Amino acid sequence: MAVAHTPSRATDSLAAVLVTVGVVLLALLTLYLVGFDQGAVSRSGMYLHELMHDGRHLLGVPCH
């Protein structure tokens, strides 16, 4: 007879912390790219540059 293994609270807590840290890092990266990058990283084409530019206007970040 197999016994079902249930994750411990510590494992659940660690997973929640890792997900939270991942979301925060992704949010900070997005904020940097849209708000402060000014096209330094987004040189892969005019479409991406315009997307970042419109994102700055949407967030109310001055860009020009």
Image: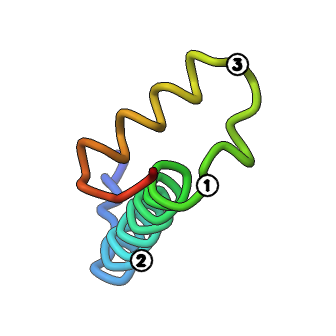
> Mark number for residue 14?
2
Question: In the rendering, at what x and y percent does residue 59 appear?
Answer: 25, 52
Q: CA distance from mark 1 to mark 3?
A: 15 Å
- Look at the picture and state if 51 lies above or below 41: above
Indicate the secondary structure of the residue bearing disc 1: loop
Which of the 4 image quarters holds residue 9?
Answer: bottom left
Tell me whether circle 1 and circle 3 mark residues in contact (CB < 8 Å): no
Q: Label 2 is placed on what type of residue? A: Leu
How many residues crowd mark 1 within 10 Å: few (<14), some (14–19), many (20+)?
A: some
Question: In the rendering, at what x and y percent does residue 24 appear?
Answer: 40, 68
- Look at the picture and state if 4 lies above or below 49: below
Residue 36 appears left or right of 20: right
Q: Which residue is mark 3?
A: 45
Q: Label 3 is placed on what type of residue? A: Gly
Q: CA distance from mark 1 to mark 2?
A: 32 Å
Question: In the rendering, at what x and y percent does residue 27 appear?
Answer: 40, 59
Q: Which residue is mark 1?
A: 37
Q: CA distance from mark 2 to mark 3?
A: 39 Å
